[in-house]
Image: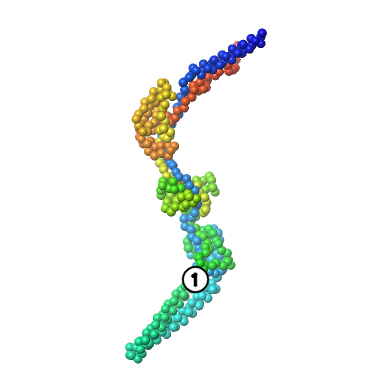
Amino acid sequence: MKSKKSKIIAAAILAIAVIMIIWNRNGDSGKLAVNFQYCKVEKKDISSGVTATGTIEPVTKVEVGTQVSGIISRVYVDYNSIVRKGDIIAELDRTNLISELSSAENNMRSAEAEYNYQKKNLERMKTLFEKGLISRDEYETADLSFQKANNSYQTSKFSVEKARTNLGYATITSPIDGVVLSKAIEEGQTVAASYNTPTLFTIAANLADMRLIADIDEADIGSVKEGQRCIYTVDAFPNDTFEGYVTQVRQEPTTTSNVVTYEVVISAENPHLKLKPGLTANVTIYTLECRDVLAVNSKALRFVPNPTLLGEEYTIKDVDAKNKLWTIEGTTLTAHAVTTGMSNGALTQITGGIEEGTEIISDIEFGNKATAKSTERSPFAPGPPPSKKKK
């Protein structure tokens, strides 16, 4: 009998609990908790940029070669050597070059002797011709011999000059002030300059003044202009951020795997010599940059109150404007027509229509009031422990 009564009591309690839950839900039916989100109209920096990768390189880099063939007899510099313009950095063996010069000088002396003889012979033939003692044919033959001797003499002088110049090329000097980046020869090595000029050294002019060559996608190149500020990082110094500016936008396209890019040159001052030639840099070019302007979160401009969801509790005062911001006072939402300027997507410049510091609605959230009340609990949940009263 007691078991039957217990079951009836449990069923009654369960029924009461279900009724209470249904009553709570139906009691709040259609009523949604309104939670406004706010932001302020205030001074901010607005910027947007183009990101790309590039390579650090010296502004001036010269490849030093040789115009004559021979054996390297001496090398005076090594990697990272600091050189001045005109410093001797290597020498070729001069033996063959000196022999070529001596041979050319001997040929010149022979040609000079022949030239002097034919010159005097022509003068004699001219005198005889004027007196009618020889024929015109003999005179013209003497003149022709003189012209040939003169040409041979001039050619021999050019050969001597060339041999002397080649001998000078045996001494390789630095064309600029700078640092030796690479060395491709050792003493005793033979270099051949028959078809092209071999590169012996690569010298960078000033490593304190570098540049960054960035590859910009064709979709972004239209917004890149000279003078724009840039920041970039390199993996060698992940905690450092370097700054520069665009110095040149090159017009020649580069196509790789059907992707078209353009080279953009960015200044890269390097006073502490941290940046090294060849480092890969991740660069951001600020194509839009405006400092200390009145701005607002862009989503506030997209906010539109929904009268149906807000219900009759709230009053909406709207205006006919393309761009507007909303404020709330009590239960009244008021729209303010504003004029906008530049935008980077997240922030939008406000040029008029509302004062600085105004708190505006940026978004709104709705929820069931029964779930919104943090103080509301089930009547069957255990309550707080009773307080102990002093007797």
Q: Position of residue 309 (x, y in %)?
A: 43, 24
Residue 109 appears at what percent x and percent y?
46, 80
Above or below residue 132? Residue 37 is above
Name which residue lies at 57% across and 64% down.
186
- In this image, 243 relative to 319: left or right? right
Specify whether 382 is left or right of 206: right
Q: Is residue 326 above or below residue 159?
A: above
Viewer-closest of 110 and 319? 319
**Relative image position of residue 353 (x, y in whole percent):** 35, 33
How crowded pointer 1 is (Cα within 10 Å; few <14, some 14-19, many 20+) is rated as: many
Q: Give SS at disc 1.
A: helix
Occupied quadrant, residue 21: top right
Check the image and name the residue furthest to the front.
258
- Which amino acid type corresponds to the residue marked 1 in the rendered image? Asn
Relative depth, front residue between 266 and 312: 312
* Residue named by callout 1: 166
Toward the top, the furthest residue is 1
Residue found at x 53% / y 58% = 181
- The residue at the point 48 percent across, 77 percent down is 104
Residue 331 can be seen, yes or no = no
In the picture, which quadrant includes the C terminus?
Answer: top right
Q: Is residue 12 visible?
A: yes
Q: Quadrant of the N terminus?
A: top right
Q: Where does the image place residue 195, in percent across and percent down from the top left?
A: 51, 67
Residue extending furthest left? 131
Q: Tell me what residue is drawn at x 53 percent, y 63 percent.
A: 200
Q: Is residue 72 above or below residue 145?
A: above
Q: Nearer the viewer, residue 99 or 121?
A: 121
